[in-house]
Amino acid sequence: MATSSIQWNPGWTTRQPERGDLVLVLSGSGVFKPGDGWLQPLESMPVQAGSAGFVSLGSADGRAVFVTEVPESVSADGDIVSLRDALMMISDVPAAMLSTGFQVWQWFQDHQYCGRCGGCMGFHRRERAKWCDSCSIPWYPRLAPCVIVVIRKEDHYLLAKSSRVKRHFYSLIAGFVEPGESLEAAVVREVKEETGLDVTNIQYRASEPWPFPHQLMAGFFADYAGGELVLQEDELADAGWFLPGSRPPVPPETTISGRLIRDMERMITGGVSGLE
Ligand SMILES: [Zn+2]
């Protein structure tokens, strides 16, 4: 199944896979990738696959899709591609399907027992959720909202290098939204905490799921409003103001940070400012 031809539709069923259904096979932090596609028929899976169970994801080209995981020791024909490399480096990857697969599998692993009574749980009949019969409560997949922001100061914009990420990219200020906080308030707080700067004119631009393990990134533009750059050392190794066209390496356009950066550059240079 060629990647470019996949018509992916998220969905839910409590049934288990049958012959002819397709499976997204995970292995550790990677995807088991057969040939030029990302899915394989149930009957073609590695022998030891499936012992961890299957979870419904939806359908691709009209065939039901499930996700499972094989131990990293299992060998079979095909490559294991890390999810991070797939989402950052490959332009025609079915990103929504892979993101959904990893997040759903993480939820399935993390919710084997009810968080309230500790009892075993089954699937909810109609929704993608686990269900505790004793407590009569559903447990849905977790989502963690995060903000990510490009800060503009006249013709420059701010790039920062994380002290945790090993890749040699400069990227944007980002962080988790806290309970009781709006997205805009999270932008103001994260920027202040990590850089010492004040921002204003916060404008929403775009969003993207980021399954490491379950972030939902909300992307913003903001204008510099005051303050001196003082880095939070456990978060940022470096940061600075850059002109469009004279920047260090940044994430590719397959990521929301890469798209926001290029979109801001186009806005500063007076070009098209759409994210599409
Ligand atoms: Zn319970």
Image: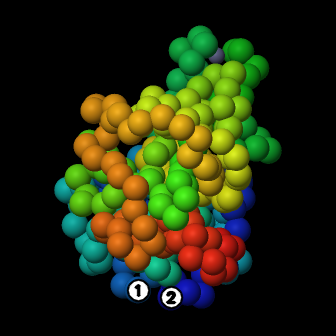
Looking at the image, is mark 2 or mark 1 earlier in the sequence?
2
Position of residue 127 in the picture relative to residue 21 (left or right): right
Ligand 1 found in image quarter: top right
The amino acid at mark 1 is Asp
Q: Are marks 2 and 1 in contact (CB under 8 Å)?
A: yes
**In which quadrant will I find the C terminus?**
bottom right
Percent position of residue 263, x then y: 58, 70
Q: In the displayed image of the protein, which residue is found farthest to the top?
A: 117
- Quickly name the residue at label 2: 2
Q: Secondary structure at mark 1?
A: loop
Quadrant of res 38:
bottom left
Residue at image x 57%, y 18%?
A: 115
Q: Secondary structure at mark 2?
A: loop
Label 1 crowd (10 A; few <14 / some 14-19 / many >=20): few
Percent position of residue 173, x then y: 46, 46
Percent position of residue 258, x then y: 47, 66
Q: CA distance from mark 2 to mark 1?
A: 6 Å
- Quickly name the residue at label 1: 36
Residue at image x 70%, y 46%?
A: 201
The amino acid at mark 2 is Ala
| Residue 274 in sight in this render | yes
Given residues 21 and 94, the one toward you in this image is: 94
